[in-house]
Image (cartoon, helix red, strand yellow):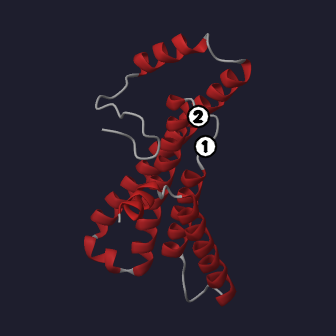
């Protein structure tokens, strides 16, 4: 099995913290000073994002427990629905960001891929649309969000890997 973004093999097993530390330790001697700096920053950001994921998930679970205590029928309320799905998307955005950092860390890529950054931005815009109160938002805000979504969608399409499509076109 291969990672769709990198073409690198994907491991079926989970890396333990000890295994990951040993791998980094063995690579550490071969890294330049700047690569060591990058790896240190990525490791710190990974820990921060992991903490954000844990806290956001804990908050989501607490909110869901409160909803269940008050009665699940209230989830039909648009404000509650928007709030819950806004929290779910917050967790997903943080997980995608953490995944992007892990790809940089494990594959020794010097730069975060533009596709990943654009995907995270699109997820953030989707979250914003979900929690947006259309009755209180001005048309200018909605138009700006829509324009940003279209622009990011175009950028995402432009930086997408179209090699599979090009091969199909050549085969015909």
How many residues crowd mark 1 within 10 Å: few (<14), some (14–19), many (20+)? Answer: few
Q: Position of residue 30 (x, y in %)?
A: 61, 13
Which residue corresponds to mark 1? Answer: 112
Report the front residue among 127 and 11: 11
Image quadrant holding the N terminus, namely top left
Report the front residue among 62 and 151: 151
Name the element at disc 2: loop
Up/down of 32 relative to 158, above or below = above
Which residue corresponds to mark 2? Answer: 109
- Please tell me how many numbered marks the rendered image carries: 2
CA distance separating discs 2 and 1 = 7 Å
Report the front residue among 23 and 155: 155
Q: Residue at x 48, y 42 (%)?
A: 99
From the viewer's perspective, tell me whether residue 140 is left or right of residue 71: right
Image quadrant holding the C terminus, namely bottom left
Looking at the rendering, which quadrant does residue 120 occupy?
A: bottom right
Q: Position of residue 106 (x, y in %)?
A: 50, 29
Up/down of 109 relative to 121, above or below = above
Q: Residue at x 39, y 41 (%)?
A: 3
Q: Position of residue 26 (x, y in %)?
A: 52, 11
Q: Residue at x 54, y 12 (%)?
A: 25
From the viewer's perspective, tell me whether residue 154 is left or right of residue 33: left
How many residues crowd mark 2 within 10 Å: few (<14), some (14–19), many (20+)? Answer: some
Q: Are marks 2 and 1 in contact (CB under 8 Å)?
A: yes
Q: Residue at x 45, y 77 (%)?
A: 79
Name the element at disc 1: loop
From the viewer's perspective, tell me whether residue 12 is left or right of residue 83: left
């Amino acid at each position: 099995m291969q990672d769709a973004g990198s073409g690198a093999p994907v491991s079926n097993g989970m890396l333990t913290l000890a295994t990951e530390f040993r791998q980094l330790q063995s690579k550490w001697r071969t890294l330049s000073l700047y690569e060591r700096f990058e790896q240190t920053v990525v490791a710190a950001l990974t820990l921060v994002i992991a903490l954000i994921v844990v806290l956001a998930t804990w908050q989501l679970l607490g909110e869901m427990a409160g909803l269940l205590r008050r009665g699940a029928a209230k989830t039909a309320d648009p404000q509650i629905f928007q709030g819950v799905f806004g929290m779910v998307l917050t967790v997903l955005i943080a997980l995608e960001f953490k995944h992007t950092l892990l790809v940089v860390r494990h594959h020794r890529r010097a730069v975060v891929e533009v596709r990943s950054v654009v995907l995270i931005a699109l997820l953030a815009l989707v979250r914003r649309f979900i929690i947006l109160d259309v009755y209180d938002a001005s048309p200018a805000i909605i138009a700006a969000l829509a324009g940003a979504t279209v622009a990011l969608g175009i950028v995402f399409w432009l930086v997408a890997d179209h090699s599979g499509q090009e091969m199909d076109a050549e085969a015909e």
